[in-house]
Image (tube, helix red, strand yellow):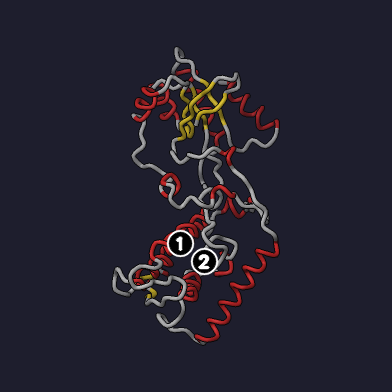
Amino acid sequence: IVMEGFNNCKILILTLTNHSKRSISRARTQPVSNMDISLVQLLTLTWFLVVGFVSSSPAIGQTRNLIQFKNMIQYKGYAYQEYWGYGCWCGKGTYGSNYFDATDYCCKIHDECYDKHAGGLFGCSPTIVTYDWTKLSDRRIQCTDSPGTCDYNICMCDKAAVDCYERHHNRECDVHNDFTLPVGIRAENLIDDSDDVAFNRPYDSSLSWRDLEWIRSITRLPLIVKGILHRGDAREAVRYGVQGIVVSNHGERRLDTSQSTIEALPDIIGVVRNEEKNYEMDVYVDGGVRRGTDILQALTVTYIL
């Protein structure tokens, strides 16, 4: 990310998670009326009731796909109504994004999986196809149709979404902060990103400190590395000659047990100021700064050490 520094000088920031691609300044919002949202939920409920009534007491493999998806969610122990506001086929459709909410990203992947298998030679219809699935121990699910068939593929789409929901269901920090986008607000420019490699593969496991050598070879801009929480990483940053580091846990909204930046700051300052006395480096910190006293605490740490 190339941005303007405090002194109007350009700096290059590399975030260690390697998932930033689009400029935040491009974000646009478009209001959606409460009536639109209520209508979607009403139609969804009507669909569940009608199909459920026709199916009476549905047996596995004998119900429409959306009902089977609902049954999978309930088998995991969750209420399917919890996901109406997300971007699934039972919600608003392909609006899920990993930008704001992990569960919404599960819905995004679910929609894309349906899109991938829809149509084809035999006319696969994800929302009405029937498939067989089995309840295993420990609330696990197994799709039992022949692999490669439409039924099997759609079952795997639903299974992947339900497993994703389970992984992200109980994020205590999300529950405590009650984080959601405001009613009627959506990030308009983040909807059509299904083909964007940076979003479908948000984390690059091959990224290493040696990549800094390549980045340094292609730019003369000051290099700042974001995501430092350990003194060992601070030493590596000095070793590779970066001009600054950002002590950051990337917001910590989705992390229930991560170290806070104010706790990590003393070790980082200790390395930069005491162990590497002949090396000048800027140290930035973010996360949890809500008022002036938070800034004073961070400054106090730097002056004491």
Residue 18 figure quarter: top left
Numbered disc 2: secondary structure: loop
- Whether the residues at callouts 1 and 2 have beta carbons within 8 Å, the answer is yes
Q: Which residue is mark 1?
A: 110
Badge 1 or badge 2: first in the primary sequence:
2
Q: Which mark is residue 283?
A: none
- What type is the residue that disc 2 sits on? Trp
Q: Which residue is mark 2?
A: 89
Residue at screen point 56% across, 60% down: 86
- What type is the residue that disc 1 sits on? His
Q: Position of residue 91 (x, y in %)?
A: 56, 65
Residue 304 figure quarter: top right
Residue at screen point 52% across, 35% down: 248
Can residue 178 be seen at all in this image of the molecule?
A: yes
Residue at screen point 46% across, 24% down: 223
Q: Nearer the viewer, residue 223 or 185?
A: 185
Q: Position of residue 110 (x, y in %)?
A: 45, 61
Describe residue 22's horizontal placement relative to residue 39 as left or right: left
Relative to residue 77, is residue 176 depicted above or below? above
Q: Residues within 10 Å of mark 2 (few under 14, many from 20)?
A: some
Residue at screen point 52% across, 63% down: 88
Q: Residues within 10 Å of mark 1 (few under 14, many from 20)?
A: many
Relative to residue 259, is residue 270 depicted above or below? above
Relative to residue 76, is residue 211 depicted above or below? above
